[in-house]
Image (cartoon, helix red, strand yellow):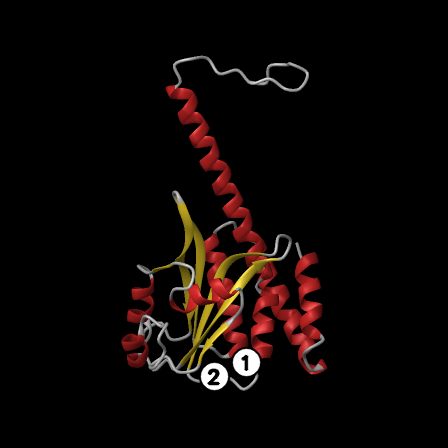
Amino acid sequence: LFRSEKVLLLSVANCLPRSQRDQESELLVRIALAVSQTDDVSLAVEQTLRHICQATGWVLGEAWVLRPVEGGEPVLGYCGEWTSEKGLLQAFTAQAAGLRFRRGEGIPGTAWGAGAPVWVSDLRTSGIFTRRALAAASRLEAAVSIPLVYADEDDIVAILQFFMREVPADNEQLVQLVSAVAAPLAQLLRQKQSDGAHRLAEARFTGIVSTASDAIISIDGARRITL
């Protein structure tokens, strides 16, 4: 479980002061353990965001996961959040649940389209942010959206978005940290997406067989009937 995550962490560690390396390694292990102990995506998302927010001091983390759309390109759908200020941010997070983003839309969709992190240093004046009024009421000043990449296939499986009171001075190092320590969550999301695609294919096949007026016979290369 930890092999690919440790490889990612090594590349980050080279960019960090030695005094920070043990802390980042510990964070990766905590997230990997939390994710490995559950098959529930919502719980895995919550635990990953919690550990990252507590390590960085960011007040809110959200997850936006790619969801298939019949006959079209996937969209980003809300998959959960964690915040240290649940009461103050309740209205802000509630609005997110009904949003969907296509590639290039909003901050998450912009990060998806660019395939790279996107920082917004002033949410009040951003042209790509869709919740300006509630952000102002919640005293949120800045945000960053970070693509979550499944390393084995170099595919984006989700966007992690974080909100803060101000842009941190070490923002690039923090982005590299998040990209590395969130790898266990990327692995779980890819597995769930693959399982979902398999179930969809099985359902479609069952539908074809159940409505066919003729017999369907499948054979292998040795002419043996397999179905």
- Please name the residue shown 58% across and 54% down the image: 187
Quadrant in the picture for residue 224: top right
- Badge 2 density bin: few <14, some 14–19, many ≥20, Cα 10 Å: some
* Secondary structure beneath label 2: loop
Report the amino acid beneath label 1: Asn
Residue 69 position (above or below residue 225): below
* Image spot of residue 55 (x, y percent): 55, 76
Quadrant in the picture for residue 162: bottom left
* Image spot of residue 105 (x, y percent): 38, 64
- Please name the residue shown 68% across and 58% down the image: 4
- In the drawing, what numbered circle is on residue 167? 2
- Please name the residue shown 53% across and 44% down the image: 194
Residue 114 position (above or below residue 169): above
- Badge 1 density bin: few <14, some 14–19, many ≥20, Cα 10 Å: few
* Image spot of residue 155 (x, y percent): 57, 55
Quadrant in the picture for residue 222: top right
**Which of these two is toward me, 174 or 82?**
174
- Callout 1 touching callout 2 (CB < 8 Å): yes
Quarter of the rendering occupied by the C terminus:
top right
Q: Which residue position holds label 1?
A: 171
- In the drawing, what numbered circle is on residue 88? none
